[in-house]
Amino acid sequence: MAAADELAFHEFEEATNLLAETPDAATTSQSDELTSREHVAVVVGSGIGYRAEVGEEEDDKTSLLQEEKPQPRFWTFDYYQNFFDVNTSQVLDRIKGSLLPHPGYNFVRHHLRNRPDLYGPFWICATLAFVLAVTGNLTLVLAQRRDPSIHYSPQFHKVTIAGITIYCYAWLVPLALWGFLRWRQGTRERMGLYTFLETVCVYGYSLFVFIPTVVLWLIPVQWLQWLFGALALALSAAGLVFTLWPVVREDTRLVAAALLSIVVLLHTLLALGCKLYFFQPLPLDHVVPAPQATPPSHNVLLPSSIQPMTTF
């Protein structure tokens, strides 16, 4: 017992001396250690929660900034920049889709997928107008080679006429169609509607089939030209009808039939007008008449040595 008391006294004395040397030192106990661990856990947990709250606040700020970002006006270049943001594979896929219509086919749903573009329709219309004007002049050149009596002069005004005709058709007809469908949507609740740009995109890509057709019209065979024109018109008009049918079928049968008939009729008038104007027969002022041989004169001149007889 005395030895144990002496050992405890020595330990207490050493602890007293240690505290005297380092007065700032603190002793720890098991309860203090548990308390510190709990404090660390609370701090770590609160840090994780704080970071989560910070992340949520940053997301809210980002979405708020996007909502507050002003939308570009429709007359600025930035407004139309998104409609030209397409790659080559998308344009080729939409061109291929416009060439292969079939029943149950919907160009908007299968190819546009809520992302209409203006790049394809713009260049298709420009190419078609240029090809129409060039092939219309080449027709006269080839005719002159076959018949030298034909006089040819370049007709540059056809470029302007072709451009105005194609671009007006590709924009004004979809605008009128979209406006009519929007008006009918107010009377028919279940009737769907394409956007104006989707309608323009459908019409623009539907004109692509006429580009190779116009080149084939250089073949100087009338029945082949009309055959190629009829096939191109059938493919293009079928694509329009199959695409517009899911929208107009909710309307009355009379309105749907009349609207689709007008769409096909306008498409026919465009193809027919291009064929008759740019590939029309040569006018009379372009043909040089062949020189005609002058008939021999019936008046015979008498020789000067022969004098007429006079009477007295």
Image (cartoon, rainbow, N blue to C red):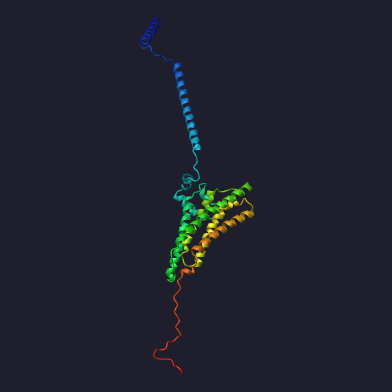
Residue 91 image position (x, y, % from top left): 47, 51
Q: Is residue 267 left or right of residue 77?
A: right
132 left or right of 246 in image: left
Determine which quarter of the picture holds residue 306. bottom left
- The one nearer the camera, 225 or 32, is 225
168 to the left or right of 300: right
Task: Measuring from the top left, give residue 89's x and y in whole percent.
Answer: 45, 50
Percent position of residue 290, x then y: 45, 74
Task: Say which quarter of the image contains residue 155.
Answer: bottom left
Q: How many numbered circles does the render carry? A: 0
Q: Nearer the viewer, residue 266 or 236?
A: 266
The quarter of the picture where the N terminus appears is top left
For residue 59, above or below residue 82:
above
Q: Nearer the viewer, residue 259 or 54?
A: 259
**Res 248 visible:** yes
Q: Is residue 10 left or right of residue 155?
A: left
Q: Position of residue 74 (x, y in %)?
A: 50, 45
For the question of whether residue 105 can be seen, the reply is: no
- Outermost residue, top direction? 2
Q: Residue furthest bottom?
A: 312
The residue depicted at 48 percent of the width and 55 percent of the height is: 125
Say which residue appears at 46% left-offset and 60% top-offset. Answer: 157
Viewer-nearest residue: 44 or 10:
44
Please name the residue shown 55% across and 57% down the image.
238
Residue at the left extreme, as displayed: 21
Q: Residue at x 54, y 51 (%)?
A: 199
